[in-house]
Image: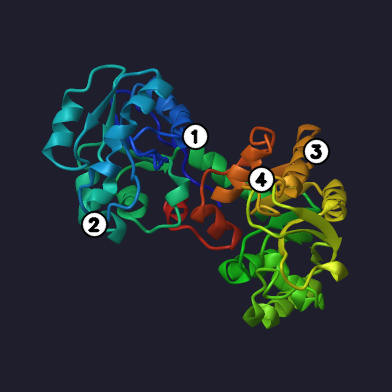
Amino acid sequence: MEYKTIDDLGDLNGKVVMLRADLNVPMDENFNVTNTARIDRTVPTIKELMSKGAKVVVTSHLGRPEGKGDMANSLSHITKDLQKALGKPVVFVDDCIGPHVSEAIKNMKPDEVLLLENLRFYKEEKKGDENFAKELVAPVDVYVSDAFSTAHRDHASMVAAVKLRPSAMGRLMEEEVNALSKGLNDPKRPLIAIVGGSKVSTKLDLLNNLVKKVDKLVISGGMAHTFMKASGIDTVNEANSLVQMDMLDTAKEIMKTAQANNCEIILPIDVVVSKEFKPHAEHKTVDLQHIPAEGWSLLDVGEKTIAAINAKLDECKTLVWNGPLGVFEMKPFDNATNKVAEHAAELTQAGKLMSVAGGGDTVSALANAGVEKKFSYISTAGGAFLEWMEGKELPGVIALKK
């Protein structure tokens, strides 16, 4: 499927272009941005549009203000960071629709960018209201959607607005869609997926889709405990793990589907257990048959499992990763995630592996491992990345198809 990109928009000189960006960034209690990644990744599209002579008006959501004004979620807090990243003056407008916006656009100076107030200050945004979308695009000529992270939502700015003006993907969304397509829809094989998470129940759609698409599936994190139990590892129980006893039959069904589709499932063969859930707690590595019945918890996988996963990576040409292998937030229980991430990064840098990763915890885990710039692509999207991996169509992407 082909999508409309900036290349399809023609002459933009003198035109007003609204850019639906993702500026939903984390902030501290003093409203200082603590991670500018999403701002930084928006800049190339803004600069390209400006280089084509367009007047750029940036709009986004921030937080969950639930349809009413809330200064804690005002995009005014983002202005200085966007201006710094862009190297151009950014003028904040305290609304996203109406006469204030139209007037600000009329008064734009060359080389200026407008940043509008939070879209979600209007409840109509999340409802996908077409009249709100009409008001949003009323003062602009062209609409560019660059917020892949919200593409799984049927919101007014993601779907309705796209239909009301000549529209296209921004470069960030284009990158995301291309990378995920190469990673899962049209990969070089063998294709391996690493999936972590605390519960099987939260990633059922993902697992059921992946076992039909990938050649090898590493199941890690807390959800692996349920699969280990379902595989007959009796030393895993509710006292020492995150096993979901009510999901054992489901896990067995997933394993059966994997077998029918020639998908090899890789589970832990040794684990790191600890008496306490805290950094640098007393811990030891044990084989599966020696997991203590109680008093110890499974917090990571051991060196044998790390070696086994890395050996599987050596056999593959494409990797898709969502979720850490252990409790990566606490040392030394980030060991397995770090070592596997480092190996995947080495293979990527050597041109042997196409590696795509995404999801909030995954991005943090790879940053913790120091490899966030060594993968082929790391998605800033959370829910949209997950739904893409689940095989679902994303409304905000479908709206941009040719």
Between disc 2 and disc 4, whose residue precedes? 2
- Residue behind mark 3: 347
- Residue behind mark 2: 124
Give how far apart the Cα atoms at labels 2 and 4 are. Answer: 34 Å
Give how far apart the Cα atoms at labels 3 and 1 are. Answer: 25 Å
- Residue behind mark 1: 37
Disc 3 and disc 2 in contact, CB within 8 angstroms: no
* Residue 244, image quadrant: bottom right
Between disc 1 and disc 2, whose residue precedes? 1
Give how far apart the Cα atoms at labels 3 and 2 are. Answer: 47 Å
Local SS, label 1 = helix
Residue 392 appears anywhere in the view: yes
Between disc 4 and disc 1, whose residue precedes? 1
Q: Count how many numbered circles sit on residues in the image.
A: 4
- Residue behind mark 4: 356
The residue lying at 37 percent from left, 59 percent from top is: 154
User: Which colour scheme appears in the figure?
Assistant: rainbow
Between disc 3 and disc 4, whose residue precedes? 3
Q: Position of residue 285 (x, y in %)?
A: 83, 56
4 or 1: mark nearer the eye: 1
Q: Position of residue 50 (x, y in %)?
A: 37, 23
Q: Position of residue 363 (x, y in %)?
A: 59, 44
Seen from the viewer's position, the closer of residues 331 and 194 is 331
